[in-house]
Image: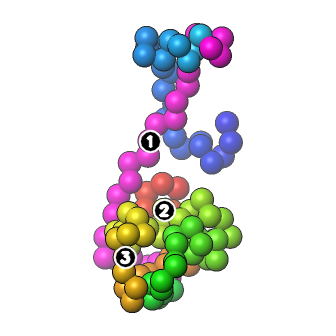
């Protein structure tokens, strides 16, 4: 298992619901990773994170900002979650958002690292 998933709980699934998938793959069981419990940072935790103020513009996308700040589009959700904006449709042109600068620290504060 890679280090990325070392803190995740593993579940062994042998339920009849997955029988067609297991049969297709020739498996007796399927291993699932547990979903991490996400939490919102409290004001003290937020104050410890360095952030960059950003004004939402027409055409902005979370994945583009993640690429710009983290060099990895997969972490778009960190920016969305930190700003309590689950989708780009939650924001309008001119909205001020904060982008955590240090991804590793942000993941710790959010409870997933």
* Quadrant placement of the N terminus: top right
Label 3 SS: loop
Q: Is residue 80 left or right of residue 32?
A: left
Badge 1: few (under 14), some or many (20 or more) residues near its Cα, within 10 Å?
few
Of residues 108 and 58, the one nearer the viewer is: 58
Disc nearest the viewer among 3 and 1: 3
Mark 3 or mark 2, earlier in chain: 2
Q: Is residue 53 above or below residue 61?
A: below
Residue 24's quadrant in the figure? Answer: top right
* Mark before the other along the chain sequence, 2 or 1: 1
What label sits on residue 77 in the rendered view? 2
> Could you tell me how far apart the alpha carbons at marks 2 and 1 are, in whole angstroms?
15 Å
Residue 87 location, x and y as percent?
40, 65
Q: How crowded is the residue under tag 3: few (<14 C-alpha within 10 Å), some, or many (20+)?
A: some
Q: Residue at x 34, y 71 (%)?
A: 90
Examine the structure image and report whether residue 9 is included in the region drawn in magenta. no
Residue sitting nearer the eye, 71 or 64: 64
Check disc 2 and report its element: helix, strand or loop: helix
Of residues 88 and 39, the one nearer the viewer is 88
Q: Nearer the viewer, mark 3 or mark 2?
A: 3
Q: Is residue 42 above or below residue 57?
A: above
Say whether residue 43 is left or right of residue 70. left
In which quarter of the view is residue 86 placed? bottom left
Query: Mark 2 Cα within 10 Å, few/some/many (few <14, many 20+)?
Result: some
Q: On the image, numbered disc 3 is attached to which residue? A: 91
Which residue is located at x 43 percent, y 11 percent?
16
Q: Residue furthest left?
A: 43
Residue 30, position as x, y percentages in the image: 56, 21
Element carrying mark 1: loop
Q: Is residue 16 above or below residue 39?
A: above
Residue under label 1: 35
């Amino acid at each position: 298992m890679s280090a990325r998933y070392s803190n995740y709980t593993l579940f062994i699934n042998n339920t009849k619901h997955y029988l067609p998938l297991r049969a297709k793959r020739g498996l007796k069981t399927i291993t699932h990773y547990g979903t991490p419990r996400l939490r919102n940072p409290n004001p003290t935790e937020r104050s410890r994170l360095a952030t960059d103020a950003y004004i939402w513009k027409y055409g902005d996308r979370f994945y583009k900002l993640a690429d710009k700040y983290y060099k990895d589009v997969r972490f778009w959700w960190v920016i969305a979650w930190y700003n309590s904006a689950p989708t780009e449709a939650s924001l309008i042109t001119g909205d001020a958002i904060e982008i955590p600068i240090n991804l590793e620290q942000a993941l710790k504060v959010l409870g997933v690292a």
